[in-house]
Image: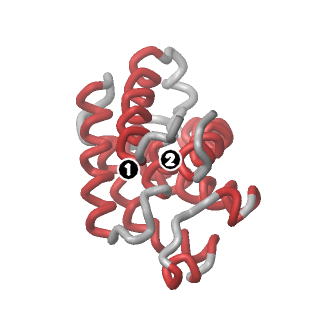
Amino acid sequence: MKKPGFLVLYLLLIIAQVLLNNFSFFERYVLVTFLPVMIMCIPVDKGTIFCMAVAFLTGFAVDFLGDGMLGLTSLSLVPVALARNGVISLVFGSELFARGENISLRKQGVGKMILGTLLMTAIFLAVYITADGAGTMPFLYNLAKGGVSLFVSTALSFFIAHFLTSDEKWK
């Protein structure tokens, strides 16, 4: 069976994130998200403006269909899309852009994929937790929530990245 296209997988992962947001009762303490790695895995030949538009629409869809505050996920995903090319160049090297290759776990390795996922998720969580708390939550609470969320989301995002970047056919 041939692997479905990137767009189909992307839409299914948006639905999975919406379901996770709607049916998780621990979001007050731990924010589990894999949206930043979805933005990171958009094909490299797409420009920054395209990625920012996709990030905005993805965040808006997750907030609209989920139980989140409308616009908060969009506010957090757009900086991730803005920093995407810089993070890819920093972690994976600028050869990806020169050769026109997409990110691949098999080619770049586990360490680079975890580092890229960690950086993208950290940007998302920093903006999200800061905007969500908006001065009403204590700093140490937000710091602890961010640290635990970063660990959990990076671990989950690594597997999502493997799923989105694998070039093999399904069996």
SS of the residue at dot 1?
helix
Q: In this view, does 147 lie above or below 12?
A: below
Q: Do the residues bearing badges 1 and 2 touch, measured as CB atoms within 8 Å?
A: yes
| In this picture, residue 113 sits left or right of residue 7 | right
In screen coordinates, is 57 left or right of 125?
left
Q: Which of the 4 image quadrants contains residue 32?
A: top right
Could you tell which of marks 1 and 2 lies nearer the N-terminus?
1
Q: Where is residue 113 in the image (x, y as percent from the top left)?
A: 66, 58
Q: Which of 84 and 24 is in front in this view?
A: 84
Relative to 65, is 92 on the left or the right? right
The residue that label 2 is drawn on is 125
Q: Is residue 149 visible?
A: no
What residue type is disc 1 on?
Ser
Report x, y in % for residue 37: 51, 50
**Residue at horizontal 32 percent and vertical 34 percent from the top:** 62
| Between 46 and 118, the one nearer to me in the picture | 46
Name the spot of residue 101 as percent of width and height, x first: 52, 71
Q: Where is the C terminus found, in terms of image quarters?
A: top right
x and y percentages locating residue 160 in the rendered image = 57, 41
| Cα–Cα span, label 1 and label 2 | 7 Å
Residue drawn at the location 53% of the way across and 47% of the way down: 164
**Is 166 located above or below residue 94 in the figure?**
above
Q: Nearer the viewer, residue 45 or 25?
A: 45
Q: What residue type is labelled 2?
A: Leu
Residue under circle 1? 76
Q: As rendered, which of 147 and 140 lies closer to the eye?
A: 147
Count neighbours of disc 1 (C-alpha within 10 A) and say few if under 14, some if 14 to 19, many if 20 or more: many
Q: How crowded is mark 2: few (under 14 residues within 10 Å), some or many (20 or more)?
A: many
Question: How many labels sit on residues?
Answer: 2
